[in-house]
Image (cartoon, grey):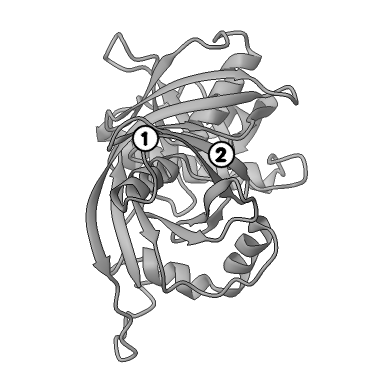
C-alpha cells in the first residue's frame, strides 16, 4: 500500500494512494458508509499502532463523482469514518502538490460531507473553503457524571461538535490528560442525552475554548477526536463549527480574520462569509509538511497485522 505521511500543525495525515478496498460505486457518502460498516479492519490496520500512531487521520483517495473535482477522499481515524477533515484536507493539498498532481491555485475536492475548495498558496500553505457550517443548539446543559453540569453549544462543521466556552480547565499542554478525560465524559453525556444533530447524528468531537497567552491570537482550543486523542492542530471542522457559533452570537463579523491556536500552539487563520442556508462558509488557512513516502506491508504472519486493539 503506497502512502504519503504529512502533518498539519503537528496533526498527522496518511494519504493512501493505492491498495485500499474496493468500495464500489455510488456517492462518496455511500462509499464512506461502506468503508465504515464493511472495512473496519482495513482502516484500523492503517491507523492503529504499530503501523499508525495516535491522532493520525487517514485519507483514502477515490474517484470523484463530480468531474470538476481533482479527487474524491474519505477521511477516517482509528475509531470512525469522518464526514470531512480540515487538517487532512490541508495535508492532502500539500501531498498532491508534492506528487505534481496540482499546482498553485484553486482546486475542488469531493468529500462525503460535500465539495470543498482548496487554494494552494505555496508548497506548504493551503486555504480550505469548507462546507457551510451551522450552530444547531445554544447553551445546552448536560449533567456529566463525575463533573456535574456543563453547558455548551452543538454545532456542525463537517463533523459534530459540542463546544464549551469558556473551558472549565485552562487550555494548556500540562492539562491535556485532564481535558481528555473530561471531554470523553462530556461526549458520552451528550450522546446519552440525544444532544447531537437534527437527524440524531451523535457528537463525535468536543471542544474546550480558552485564552491564548499571545495577544495576537483570538483563542486557543483543545479538541477531542473520535479515537479519544486530542487534535494537535486547531481542527479545521471544529474551527468551522466555532465560526458558526461566533457568527450566530454576533461576536465575529463576516470577512474579519482571526487566528485560532491549538493546545500545542499551532495556528489556523480563519474567516467566513454568510452561507445560503443561514450558516457560514468558513475559510481555514494552515500549513502542512510532507514527512514520509512509503509502502505499507501487511504480512499474513504478522500477529499485529490489523493493529494493536487493546
Q: Earlier in the sequence, mark 1 or mark 2?
A: 1
Q: Does residue 243 appear in the picture of this structure?
A: yes
**Which residue was labeled with disc 1?**
104
Residue at left 71%, top 40%? 197
Say left or right for 225 vs 299. right
Label 1 crowd (10 A; few <14 / some 14-19 / many >=20):
some
Q: Name the quadrant containing residue 56.
A: bottom left
Query: Which residue is at the far right?
Result: 199
The quarter of the picture where the N terminus appears is bottom left
Question: At numbered mark 1, what does the secondary structure look like: helix, strand or loop?
Answer: loop
Label 2 crowd (10 A; few <14 / some 14-19 / many >=20):
some
Say left or right for 235 vs 27. left
Q: How far across and how far down the image is residue 28, in percent?
A: 63, 57
Out of 128 and 175, give the one closest to the viewer.
Answer: 128
Q: Name the quadrant containing residue 219.
A: top left
Q: Name the quadrant containing residue 198.
A: top right
Q: How far across and how far down the image is residue 189, in percent?
A: 61, 43
The quarter of the picture where the C terminus appears is bottom left
**Which residue was labeled with disc 2?**
116
Query: Do the residues under discs 1 and 2 have CB atoms within 8 angstroms?
Result: no
Residue at left 34%, top 80%? 305
Note whether 79 is above or below 116 in the view shown. Answer: below
Of circles 1 and 2, which is in front?
Answer: 1
Amino acid at each position: 500500500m503506497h502512502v504519503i505521511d504529512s502533518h498539519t500543525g503537528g496533526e498527522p495525515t496518511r494519504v493512501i494512494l493505492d491498495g485500499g478496498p474496493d468500495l464500489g460505486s455510488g456517492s462518496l457518502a455511500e462509499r464512506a458508509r461502506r468503508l465504515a460498516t464493511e472495512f473496519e479492519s482495513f482502516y484500523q490496520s492503517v491507523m492503529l499502532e504499530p503501523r499508525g500512531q495516535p491522532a493520525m487521520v487517514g485519507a483514502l483517495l477515490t474517484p470523484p463523482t463530480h468531474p470538476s473535482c481533482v479527487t474524491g477522499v474519505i477521511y477516517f481515524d482509528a475509531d470512525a469514518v469522518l464526514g470531512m477533515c480540515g487538517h487532512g484536507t490541508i495535508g492532502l493539498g500539500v501531498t498532491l502538490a508534492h506528487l505534481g498532481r496540482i499546482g498553485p491555485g484553486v482546486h475542488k475536492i469531493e468529500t462525503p460531507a460535500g465539495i470543498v475548495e482548496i487554494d494552494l498558496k505555496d508548497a506548504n500553505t493551503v486555504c480550505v473553503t469548507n462546507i457551510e457550517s451551522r450552530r444547531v443548539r445554544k447553551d445546552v446543559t448536560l449533567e456529566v457524571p463525575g463533573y456535574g453540569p456543563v453547558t455548551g453549544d452543538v454545532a456542525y462543521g463537517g463533523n459534530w461538535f459540542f463546544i464549551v466556552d469558556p473551558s472549565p480547565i485552562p487550555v494548556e499542554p500540562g492539562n491535556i490528560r485532564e481535558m481528555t478525560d473530561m471531554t470523553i465524559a462530556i461526549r458520552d453525556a451528550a450522546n446519552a442525552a440525544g444532544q447531537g444533530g437534527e437527524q440524531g447524528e451523535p457528537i463525535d468531537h468536543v471542544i474546550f475554548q480558552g485564552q491564548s497567552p499571545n495577544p495576537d491570537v483570538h483563542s486557543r482550543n483543545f479538541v477531542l477526536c473520535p479515537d479519544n486523542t486530542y487534535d494537535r492542530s486547531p481542527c479545521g471542522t471544529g474551527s468551522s463549527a466555532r465560526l458558526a457559533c461566533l457568527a450566530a452570537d454576533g461576536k465575529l463579523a463576516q470577512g474579519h480574520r482571526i487566528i485560532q491556536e491549538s493546545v500545542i500552539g499551532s495556528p489556523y487563520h480563519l474567516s467566513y462569509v454568510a452561507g445560503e442556508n443561514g450558516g457560514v462558509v468558513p475559510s481555514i488557512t494552515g500549513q502542512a509538511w510532507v514527512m514520509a513516502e512509503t509502502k505499507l506491508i501487511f504480512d499474513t504472519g504478522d500477529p499485529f497485522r490489523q493493529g494493536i486493539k487493546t
